[in-house]
Image (cartoon, rainbow, N blue to C red):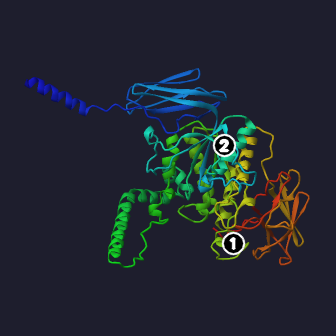
Amino acid sequence: MCMKIYTSISVALLLLSAEPVRALNMCWVFDNQMVLQADRAVPVWGQTEPGGTVTVRFGEQEKTAVADAEGEWAVRLDPMPVSAEGRELHVEAPTGTKVFEDVLVGDVWIASGQSNMAQPSAMKSTGGEPFEDWAGNPLLRTFNVPYNRWSAEPQTRQFPWETRVTNWLRWRPASGHTPAVPFFFGKMLQEQTDRPIGILLVPLGASSAETWVPMEVLLNDPEFADYARQSQEYMAQHPENRAAFEARVAEWEQRKEEAEERGEEFTEQRPRTGMDAAFWPRWWAGALFNSHIAPLRNYAVKGVIWYQGENNAAGHGGAAKTSESYQRLMHLLIDSWREQFEQPDLPFYQVQLSMFNWNDYNNRRERDPNQPGGWSVIREAQEQVARDVPHSGIAITVDVGAKANIHPPNKRPMGERLALLALRDVYGKDVIADGPTFAGYEVEDDRIRVRFKHTYGGLTVLPREEVPDGRLVGFAIAGEDRNFVWADAKIEGDTVVVWSDMVPEPVAARYAYVQYHDVNLGNGEGLPAAPFRTDDWPLAGE
């Protein structure tokens, strides 16, 4: 009898101490209706019982792997041709089986950055016909990478399947809530290439570029190391700071309740963190890379579209506030993402910041050509990065901004101009993707003649409601005193002549070099001219 009792106790203790069986888990990006990348080895990975054999089947392929001591496993499917036929992806492990249905093979693009990349299409404000009646496209699909946390460490292991809060979806923006820039980008790509297109939506509003770069990369860079160390301190202090803040809120609620019980008016405002850097993970070095990009590991993708810079331009939260520092930061970001996805030539296309005058928005001052502000600083950096980084480009959008709206509603041109870059550079299509670009200048007595390239069909004045008389606007000119004034301008062939009676001996000219101004120079394809300056003087916004 005693032996039986001891034996039962021993078995119970053994069961309690044994390693629990680990169910088959996979990253949330694996789902029904997903798009796998064509013409490239496709990683498939997950977790299961340590030592367990996992079999992955797709089409005619079958791959196996043995989970390591941590339960991690991974296989790579051989490169596959494009296929619009929905098929099943089977994953079988000792602790479970997952079957993903209607899986296509095409091109997968990452769409990341700030809120303008996530901003929904207003449909009738997209610069074209409304899309309420658009029937959708089964070959255009999207996955919204969930934001449910930030992380101090790269989340390279899988989030449990049960925590998923989103799915791959066929794109049908009938409600008007579809992110506009990725939609118009993907729609144009799919229609022009006839390939299935999948978009991984990975933006987060008010995020600095620094938060999308791995922490260790910034720690090892002399320019950003201090910022990274400060971010580490905020991360370490966050639980304590959060607890202290919640205690203040509880005390406020108690005071409010007591005042109401006494019948007294209570006017004290509820405590808020606001945009306090200590409470703002989307500014912390590496925090969003860890939670949004690292979990994707080396998921096979075609390229990246990026719309960010407002937060750095406004001077919030980030370390990069000059043109040179933002350029360096973007080099680090692009290099680290290319390493993350194991593609040294990963295409990377930016949306240049459109026109928006923070000062006009806050009614603080009139537009001043001598005050280019942070937006011009970041625009200049974005263009330089596009010139310096191989397999990258930039969509110029200074003609579709909104003076008093940091989220310009006219997103269609932004998405389609990104698509033109990809169609030309990635898919080899014979399309025009560039607007007029500064190519040099000469001083001619009291005038400056500016030369342009990419004038396909000739320079032209783009129609704008703000300039009903068709004048060419957006140019400024300065003499040796470096004081810029708004200038007259006219097109002569592939050049623009700029002058002002206030500057009889000009030495420098600028175009679209303020946070906001009406601009309307373009080419025969209707693409806008990029901002430029002939001088190299320090910018007042730096």
Question: Which residue occupies 72% across, 57% down?
Answer: 397
Mark nearer the N terminus (1 vs 2)? 2
- Is residue 441 in sight in this rendering? yes
Write down the quadrant of residue 347 in the picture.
Answer: top right
- Is residue 160 in sight in this rendering? no
Dot 1 amino acid type: Gln
Work out whether 465 lies above or below 526: below
Question: Which residue occupies 55% across, 57% down?
Answer: 207
Callout 2: SS: loop
- Which of the two residues, 11 or 52, is positioned nearer the viewer here? 11
Extreme residue toward the left, this view:
2
- Specify whether 20 is left or right of 518: left
Find residue 497 and report its horizontal and vertical position in percent.
88, 66
- Specify whether 4 is left or right of 421: left
Callout 1: SS: loop
Dot 2 amino acid type: Pro
Count residues near mark 2 (Cα–Cα under 10 Å), then give few for <14, some for 14-19, many for 20+: many
- Specify whether 509 is left or right of 48: right
- Which quarter of the image is occupied by the N terminus? top left
Residue under numbered circle 1? 371
Work out whether 106 lies above or below 132: above
- Specify whether 361 is left or right of 99: right
Name the mark on residue 513: none
Question: Which residue occupies 49% across, 53% down?
Answer: 219
Name the mark on residue 347: 2
Find residue 225 and report its horizontal and vertical position in percent.
49, 57
Find residue 339 and report its horizontal and vertical position in percent.
56, 41
Find residue 345 and report its horizontal and vertical position in percent.
65, 40
Q: How far apart are the alpha carbons under marks 1 and 2? A: 34 Å
